[in-house]
Image: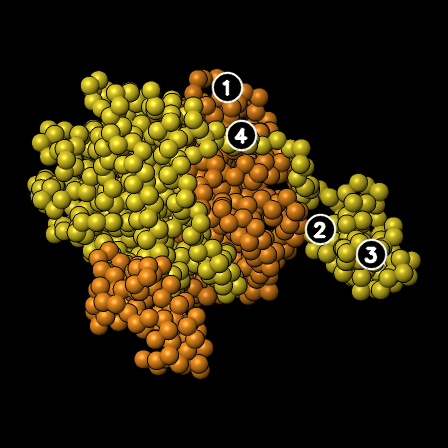
Chain colours: A orange, B yellow
Amino acid sequence: MRLSRETGVPMFQQLYEFLKAEIVSGHISSNERLPSKRKLAAHLGCSRNTVEAAYNQLVDEGYLIAKPKSGYYAAELDGVFSIGRAHQAERWDIEAEPAYAIDFSYQGVDLDHFPFSTWRKLTKEVIDENDEDLLRTGNPQGYPKLRASIARYLHRSRGVNCLPEQIVISSGTEFLLQLLIQLLDSETVYAIENPGYERLPAIFRSNRVECRPVSLDEDGVRLDELKRSMANVLCITPSHQFPTGIIMPVSRRLQLLSWAGEGPGRYIIEDDYDSEFRYSGKPIPSLQGLDRNGRVIYVGAFSKSLSPALRVSYMVLPTELLEGYKEKLGFCICPVPTIQQKALQRFMDEGHFERHLNRMRIIYRQKREAIVTAIRELLPGAKIDGTDAGLHLVMRVGNGMSETELLQRAKAHGVKVYGMSHYCSGPVAEESEAALILGFATLRIDEIHDAVRLLKTAWAS
Amino acid sequence: MRLSRETGVPMFQQLYEFLKAEIVSGHISSNERLPSKRKLAAHLGCSRNTVEAAYNQLVDEGYLIAKPKSGYYAAELDGVFSIGRAHQAERWDIEAEPAYAIDFSYQGVDLDHFPFSTWRKLTKEVIDENDEDLLRTGNPQGYPKLRASIARYLHRSRGVNCLPEQIVISSGTEFLLQLLIQLLDSETVYAIENPGYERLPAIFRSNRVECRPVSLDEDGVRLDELKRSMANVLCITPSHQFPTGIIMPVSRRLQLLSWAGEGPGRYIIEDDYDSEFRYSGKPIPSLQGLDRNGRVIYVGAFSKSLSPALRVSYMVLPTELLEGYKEKLGFCICPVPTIQQKALQRFMDEGHFERHLNRMRIIYRQKREAIVTAIRELLPGAKIDGTDAGLHLVMRVGNGMSETELLQRAKAHGVKVYGMSHYCSGPVAEESEAALILGFATLRIDEIHDAVRLLKTAWAS
């Protein structure tokens, strides 16, 4: 064994690694006495402190036993962990790269304007300031101060009336829905929008509760059909219906609220998934803000307003449901790490969130204008809907091609667009015009025009 | 308006804040033209760059509109977010401080030996290196490299045989169980250990599936009772039964595996919740490692080995269940932020996890010895069980007091201990001797003796 001053690895570390390997391999056998610190230091030509540091680390980790006035002995290795390091060659599944040059994804956010440096700074501050948050599970409903910040934000920007106590923070809308399914009566029948968020039927199915699709008219979910469905809980996206982009007018909102008030156990789950970005028309308060009977469960997330990778969503429970939640589901620990909840709370409380939203509003508005302008110019026969809010629009190309053909031709030109039929429950009427969903959040402004031109080329017959 | 060089706030920031307030308050009305940069700079005695920086930020956030060759105009504020900052006075619920001076909690970990600086360093590295992970949702089953690291760790330390593809990373054992309940047949009847983890009945109940308690003998869950229960999925903690601390011998493990092989749809959910710390006796491989028929679903977590606040748990699905998982539950996005998964993967791959486990093994062994020694000395009539592994033990005080009395007297002396009856399903036999669960992970070594002395005082009749 030789210690080297030139490797960049501290000498005690070299000695530690060497002795550990000797003990693990059995070259130093268990219960064998090691040389004294003085002798080994003399032999290696290093200081006694170096040997002492290496011996101490080996004692700490269970490879050596220090016997007072006698010396250091190699330990029995029974139970010592030896995991080894990763080998490059080890196998893991690699995510398939998308085969598309352009993706009009309606998920995801703008990749160029996230306030990385602020977020990093806040995360580091939180980690540096409070060690113990790395070790304790926090409040099961989520960090109380973050809940207060969310309550304030929802009140100011969405007209939501709630106390922080009513908020439950979780990870993803799926998880919140699963909690709600467990909280509400097992006989509950859920109504969902048709077309609608494609994961909802899967969530209800895998949770083994009944869900019934209700179709839409130009104001959103149809009241007559809702009543006929005999559902008692309605899931809707009134601010910007997914995927049609319909903004539900106040009249329909009031009708739905009065439907909810008519029977016991009736609730409306209001998914306000991309309410942050509204470009024209009067602001309409959330259903929750209009509700006087505690019948609305408001669900939101930071997926559009910040990033889907944060995995932070929340719901506002009516006070009537709060006690039951604590009793039945109090065992569910908030899945968002406290460190991240604290960073987010500071991000909100120090005004960064407000600034970020205002900046993104401008950017997304420009992207929306770029895509609308490009479509009007390059695909003059197309009809566009749902552009008053949110991060996607609906386009009816109107060139007589079927949805399948539109998608396939776009794919052949390296462009991914999304067909409306994927979001429909039940058969889609043959004669209905093909409709596509085009998201614009992840595209750069300067590539939007060319992306639409690619579609024009793809669809030229 | 005066700009000050002495406040520490950059001048452009002062100007930005001032103009924003003027616009929001209406003192500068919408569509009003602002002074040119040159004029305002001259008026304020600052550079044009200062004014330009403030104007640009206001344009970015939508308070001003820049019209080419014309100047800057206050914008219509319709839609601009104004959330404001937190007020100290705002209300949030404060977690009640525990009224106990000493808590023999069986949850939580040692608070003094977490490798904070390493964890912090790795987190910062990951955040600094790869911005995009803050913006994209990762693999729905969890970061592939972390799954590879977990597979390697489980193989080396627990004899678990699996490929990274079989691993699903989630947040907390509750979430994993909920996924499994959705994955397995809805008619599945679950058997749980009695006594056992107290949240299990609540989880099964709120997910509306049947669960039946099965009592234990000295080797763990009773086979005859399991068979009579007609359950087809068994949840057990064979490495260190919670709460009794029984380490299930190989013979019983093999009996259970052959039970699982006897019927279709039979599975064993092996919760290896605190397998990391074993102090004596031969290591027994996990049930999963003994299984030849793909009947074991292995569940683990970093809650004991690192920290419960990380909220990282995982399960290993038999390959037979993997396809069904992807099909039915592929929509469930891994709730652990990618940043944190990457930090954990590095922590494991760079050898820090191995070192941490070896260090903690020594420390927990010392704590275990301290508590056993103190009990033998101060409560000589007490019987102790379950000390061969894990972070808690079971104590039968044997002084004739009921569990309720033991708990109340301890509480009156500021000490929290846990009564076995809380973990039992169904009535506890009157004549059974009161048993308590004492965790020792969160106590400091030097306070353990005094803590046990407090119990002696509390229980002195």
Q: Amino acid at mark 1?
A: Gly
Q: Would you say the residues marked 1 and 2 are in contact, meaning their CB atoms lie under 8 Å apart? A: no
Disc 2 marks which residue?
B62
Residue at image x 37%, y 39%? B449
> Which one is earlier in the sequence, the residue at label 3 or at label 2?
3
Hey, what amino acid is under mark 2? Answer: Gly
What chain is tagged by disc 3? B
> Looking at the picture, which amino acid does disc 3 mark?
Glu
The quadrant holding residue B416 is top left
Labelled disc at residue A261 = 1
* Residue wearing tag 4: A165
Camera-nearest label, 4 or 1: 4
Are the residues flagged by discs 4 and 1 in contact, CB closer than 8 Å? no
- Whether marks 1 and 3 lie on the same chain: no
**Depicted A158 relative to depicted A383: above or below:** above
Name the quadrant containing residue A325. top left
- Mark 4 — on which chain does it sit? A
Instruction: Find disc 3 in the rendering and name its residue.
Output: B6
How far is mark 4 from mark 2, CA to CA? 33 Å
The image's mark for residue B228 is none
Does B35 appear above or below A46?
above
